[in-house]
Image: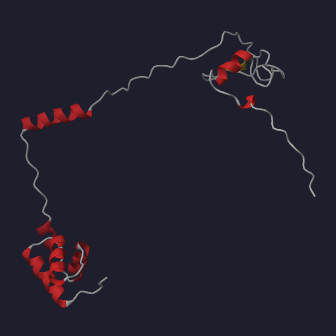
Amino acid sequence: MQFSWAEEHSRALREFLEQGLSYSEIAEALNARFNTAYTRNAAIGRARRMGLSGDEQASRTSRPKPKPQLSAAQLKKFRERFFAQVRGPKIPRRAAMPKLRCVEIVPRQLSLVELEDGDCRYPYGGDREGEPITFCGHPRRQGSSYCVPHFHLTIGPDIETERTGRKALLRLVEAA
């Protein structure tokens, strides 16, 4: 890695800048002439340290291209074509509601306070503001919080529950 530039390299950099070469072309020319490994950024940095990289150099090498002027008719056609591609439906299409599964059971509509130990805890209501939440209240299925119809409704047709597995036997180990 080279940290300082030799005087002849700096003179060559100045010459190439006067010829109007870009910094990447200058780096290539310096590397070819002196068998070095200067990069474009190294050439830019050295030119700045030498005071050669001012606004006049930037304006000489990177002039903005003038924008083409469009006639009113051309501009109108451009806008129509552009906005036809950009515009879409302003209101997104509403997704179809999925068909909900339900059970043919009439809930007892018990409040949480009225529920007893063996009652189904499947909730009803509470969807709208101020609507009370009630519960099914029918007798629960063994090992579940719900009655048989609500149990099958909540687990789905093809889903195994965690409770179908065998209960693990716990062994107490005496601590020494």
Q: In this figure, which colouring scheme has been used for the structure?
A: secondary structure
The answer to whether residue 125 is visible is no
Q: How far across and how far down the image is residue 145, in percent?
A: 76, 24
Tell me which corner region of the image, top left, top right, bottom left or bottom right, holds residue 109: top right
Residue at image x 9%, y 78%? 18
Is 108 placed left or right of 88 in the picture? right
Q: Residue at x 51, y 19 (%)?
A: 98
In the displayed structure image, the side of residue 29 where residue 91 appears, left or right:
right
**Depicted 74 relative to depicted 161: above or below:** below
Query: Residue at the location (62% across, 14% down)?
Result: 102
Q: Quadrant of the N terminus?
A: bottom left
Residue closer to the observer: 108 or 166: 166
Residue 69 placement, left or right of 6: left
Residue 89's image quarter? top left
- Report if residue 153 is visible in the image: yes
Figure quadrant of residue 115: top right
**Count of labels in the image:** 0
- Residue 79 percent coordinates (x, y): 17, 35
115 and 126: which one is in front?
Answer: 115
Q: Left or right of 158: which side holds 99?
A: left
Q: Quadrant where the C terminus lies? A: bottom right
Q: Position of residue 139 (x, y in %)?
A: 80, 16
Residue drawn at (68%, 19%) of the image: 152
Rendered position, 65 above or below 8: above
Image coordinates of residue 125 in percent, x first then y, are: 65, 19
